[in-house]
Image: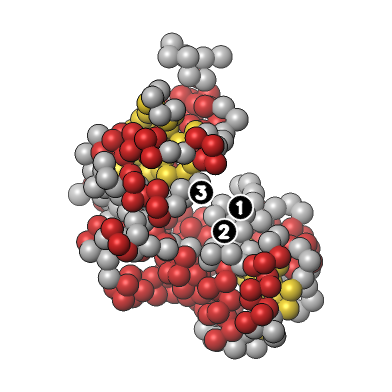
Amino acid sequence: MTDVTGAPADVLHTLFHSEQGGHEQVVLCQDRASGLKAVIALHSTALGPALGGTRFYPYANEAEAVADALNLARGMSYKNAMAGLDHGGGKAVIIGDPETIKSEELLLAYGRFVASLGGRYVTACDVGTYVADMDVVARECRWTTGRSPENGGAGDSSVLTAFGVFQGMRASAQHLWGDPTLRGRKVGVAGVGKVGHHLVEHLLTDGAEVVITDVREESVRRIQDKHPSVQAVADTEALITTEGLDIYAPCALGGALNDHSVPVLTAKIVCGAANNQLAHPGVEKDLADRGILYAPDYVVNAGGVIQVADELHGFDFDRCKAKASKIFDTTLAIFARAKSDGIPPAAAADRIAEQRMAEARRR
């Protein structure tokens, strides 16, 4: 079933009628000369210009791309609110395989579409886009972050993303065990790529025992060559069932917490960098029922968005790190709210974010 524009009616229903909707604006972009087809979704500008990355991905169809943009934009509203940023949530998706259709012409065309929004949307890197791509987009659009240091940007945001996750992990330890140190704790890290390998460094410095896994053998080898004490296991299944595991840090793909993994998870805390860790609504209750403390992913992995937001004011690493360190206090506040309201931490984080956005709308 389609509407008068030919768009799938379920997409418009999601936008205007469902709880997952409520978006302020959705822009469909096309430049036939370059092959660009993109969707820019602005969920909220209550706190300020919408901020979120550009995902370049070969979606099965246009409806799937629109739905992804809507969901990701909504998530950015919550992430930015909990990070204390004066930004709402937005996200863009470019439809197609970046390995085959990405070009300078396409990125410049995309930059012109973002610029046409007049600053209501600030873009950055995401899956399929990189610092070099943002440098190209920025030639047409000044509302572009995640650029290279040579072009006035902050470069790779994985350093502060890992630092923020580490702060969330310290807060989790404080809440559960009464001490913010990871010394003597066994921590399993699934995915030791851009963010995960920085997180391992923080954990080792703090005295943790670290177990890792990654689908890329070279990523595992890079860490073990530098730190022979780090143990590696074959896969995530082996990691989450490791005996004596205190903390599980999913730092790879989303959906890590699901109906299969939660029942066998040996850790008492889950705190990692991966986005969308909860495979479906209700998983957070399953974790709580097992006595597993969950640090909401979009709260603890906000170091990256804190960094790219700072570019708009002239990037200062120390200023960004100071903001990212507040993830410790924010995570503790979420656990306190969860306890007082009798709800899981993920629900508590949502309530706090929604309260901040609602207060901003009333001003």
Residue type, mark 2 in image? Ala
The reply to whether residue 8 is in sight is yes
Find the distance from the CA under tag 3 to the CA under tag 2: 12 Å
Residue type, mark 3 in image? Val
The reply to whether residue 15 is in sight is no
- State the image coordinates of residue 349 (x, y, percent, origin top left): 46, 59
Question: Could you tell me which residue is drawn at 40 percent across and 23 percent down?
Answer: 32
Q: In the picture shown, does residue 106 fall above or below 251?
A: above
The residue that mark 3 highlights is 127
Residue 251 sits in quarter: bottom right
| Of 259 and 274, the residue lying toward us | 274
Question: Could you tell me which residue is drawn at 30 percent across and 62 percent down?
Answer: 150
Q: In the picture shown, does residue 195 fall above or below 124?
A: below
Q: In the picture shown, does residue 2 fall above or below 286?
A: above
**Secondary structure under the numbered disc 2 in the rendered image:** loop
The residue that mark 2 highlights is 274
**Secondary structure under the numbered disc 1 in the rendered image:** loop
- State the image coordinates of residue 199 (x, y, percent, origin top left): 55, 73
The residue that mark 1 highlights is 254
Evaluate if marks 1 and 2 touch, with contact meaning CB atoms under 8 Å apart. Answer: yes
First-in-chain label (1 vs 2): 1
Left or right of 170? Residue 285 is right
Mark closer to the observer (3, 1): 3
Question: Could you tell me which residue is drawn at 43 percent across and 11 percent down?
Answer: 4
| Of 8 and 225, the residue lying toward us | 225
